[in-house]
Structures are given as C-alpha cells and as structure tokens.
Image (cartoon, grey):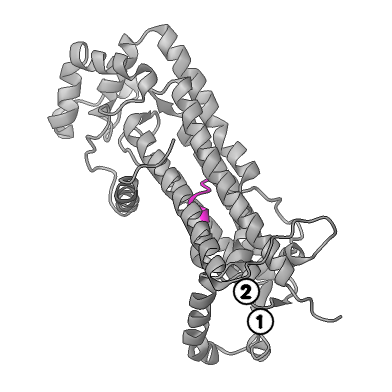
Amino acid sequence: MAIGMASGPRTNTALLLALFLLATPSSATITWQFQNFFPQHGDKYEYFLQHNCSQQFANYLTGQPQDFEEDWLGGGGKYTVLVQPVVECLLANASEYIKAAASAAQVLLGVTPPILAIIAASTDELAMLSVVGRRPLLALLISLGSPSVYIERVFEFRQPERMLRRSPGRYRPQRPETAFQRRVLAALQYAIALGAAANVASLSWRLGVGTVCAWWSDTVFAPLVWTILSIPIHLAGTFAVRLRVRRIYGDEDKEVHMGLGQWLRLLPTRLHGYWKSEWVPAISQDEIRIVSFEEEEIYVAWSWLLSTGTVINVIFGSLILSGLLFIGPQDALVVIFRYLVSVLLCRILVTFELAGMRLRYVPEPE
C-alpha cells in the first residue's frame, strides 16, 4: 500500500494530463487502456486480448477512427469506435462468474464516494484552515487528498466561527516548546498531506489506465477528473467563509472595511503574512482574533451553490466509479482502502489544526 519513490513524478504527470484533457477536445485518440489490468482477473483479460481479441486490440492501438464504422446498435459512437469493439470482445469471452464478480466490484466502488463524503472534511473546515489559520497550501493539499466533499444541508444557517469556541472535554493539542519541534511538526503535516494527495492522484490514474469507464470509455482521465473537481469546490468554500469570517490583528482592525485601492496596496503585506503563517502550525501561531459578518444575499446564494456542488461531486464520483469495467472485488477493496486512508489522514490533519486554532483563539469582548 505504500507509495513508491517514483510516485511523485508519475502523480505530477497524471495531474498535467488530466488538466490537458479538460482543455482539449475528447476526439484525441487514447491508447493507454487494456495494458495494465488489475491483478484479480487481469491474466484472463490479457489472455483474451492475445488469443480472442487480437484484431480488435490491434485496431485500437494503430487504427484511425475514421476508418471504422460506428456500432451504434452496440452502444458505440464517434469517439468510442476503436475502444468499444475491444470491450465487447473481452466481455463476450469472459465467463459469467468473472462478470458477476466485476458487477460486485462496481457496487462497492459506486458507494465509495458517499462513504468518503461522510468522513471527509467539510468546505467550512478547510476554509477556516485557509482563512483563519492562514495555511492555504496545506488546505489545498488536503482538498486533493479528499476527493469527496462532506455534504452540508442547503439553506442551513452556517456559523463557521463556532468551530473556534472552546467547550469542556474537547481535544487540546500540546504546544511545541521549541522552534525545532514546531518545524518538525509542520514538516510532518506537509508530508502526510502530500502523501495523501499523491496516493489519491496515483490511485485515480491507476484506475483510469487499468479499467474502462463504461459511459466515458474514450479516456483514461475520468477518475482523475473527479479527484481534481474537489479543489474548486473547496476554493469556493473558502470564498464563502471569507464573506462571514476574517482573521484580524491589532493593527488590522481598520482594514476590514477598506476600498479596493487600499486592499491592493496592502496585498503584498498580506501575502507576506500568509507566507510566514503557512509554515507554522495553528497551535504555534500568535493569538487568533476574528471578526464576523452577518449573512448577506451573496453569501446565501453562494452557500446554496456550494451545497449543490458537493452533491454533484458525490453523484459524479459514484457515476464514474460504478461504471468501471474489468476490476474484481478484491481489487475494489484495495482501492477503497487506499481512498479511506487518504481521507482519514486528511481529516486528522484538519481536526488537529482546528483544535490548535481553538486554543489560540481570543474571543472579542461582548
């Protein structure tokens, strides 16, 4: 289950390829499928390719879509004219036993995004880490390590500042005593977040090249697209929380209600402040003071869109994972376990940072 040393470059390449897919037409021919099956029944599929489906596979590797007729009665189309015959041939030669096992794997994978959403960090929690904790890079890595987003109720009155209120019995992390301990803690946090993000990215890439998405079969990027879509949702959550809560310092109180010109002039100073606080765990930061704002129309509308986006993210993830072919239930359990590990690690990081922020929080006198 460990991530190898070579996973970093592979993960970066996979992310760049996914972004390239979003910016280019889907008509580009992809020939990376059917060459890296998952292990449970992969040897059977490889045998079928060599002995029963060799011609269809050769057409897939070297053929041009315009040279073949679309099998629209069989579900094929303009962009699947090469991949669909290979899929049809593999399924035709696979036994009912193997296909039943694959169906069980699809059920397991289809319920994975809702399960991940239950244990994942919410958009408000990650936004508080970015806006109040002033650690946006850590929040970005955690968002990549949590492909499903916690689903919050639409039009529910949200109070992100309540996360900073202390109550008896809540977890109180120990404050590092030396600068060295603080740096070690920060490095450990980034190592965990980066490892979780790399695990999710490499796993999504492995799913893309090791399976075929039944309804998006002309690409290997479908799982990666679902993974990356969690990032804009968390960025939108950061914007929403900033409409309700800001972190302030003693000399910044007057900066809360400033004009655009003044805000632009102070932007370099603010970015420098973010850069300094980014590498400091919340438990080791200076006192945290915030100012809250009442809900306005833009916040209500943005929160509604954000809640809707989280639901769409989970549905889209279930649609992607439940449509994956040529994967067995044993392989699916390994995939689910790896996703769970990353999401749980990210959740632990967010919980620890929020606990540190509560200890450093100084409520304003009423």
Residue at image position (85%, 59%) is 168
Residue at image position (65%, 91%) is 251
Q: Position of residue 164 (x, y in %)?
A: 74, 66
- Earlier in the chain: of badge 1 and badge 2, it is 1
Residue at which label 1 appears:
248
On whether residue 147 falls in the magenta region, the answer is yes
Report which quarter residue 119 is drawn in.
top right
Report which quarter residue 281 is drawn in.
bottom right
Residue at image position (48%, 19%) is 103
- Tell me the amino acid under the disc marked 2: Gln
Residue at image position (52%, 44%) is 342
Q: Which label is found at residue 140?
A: none
- Foreground pick, 284 / 231: 284
- Separation of marks 1 and 2 at Cα, in angstroms: 13 Å
Label 1: how many Cα within 10 Å (few below 14, some 14–19, many 20+): some
On whether residue 26 falls in the magenta region, the answer is no
Residue at which label 2 appears:
285
Residue 24's place in the image compared with 258, above or below, is above
- Stretch in magenta: 142-148
Q: Is residue 312 visible?
A: no
- Foreground pick, 188 / 12: 188
Q: Is residue 244 left or right of residue 270?
A: right
In what element is the residue under mark 1?
strand
Label 2: how many Cα within 10 Å (few below 14, some 14–19, many 20+): some
- Tell me the amino acid under the disc marked 1: Ile
Q: Position of residue 104 (x, y in %)?
A: 51, 19
In what element is the residue under mark 2?
loop
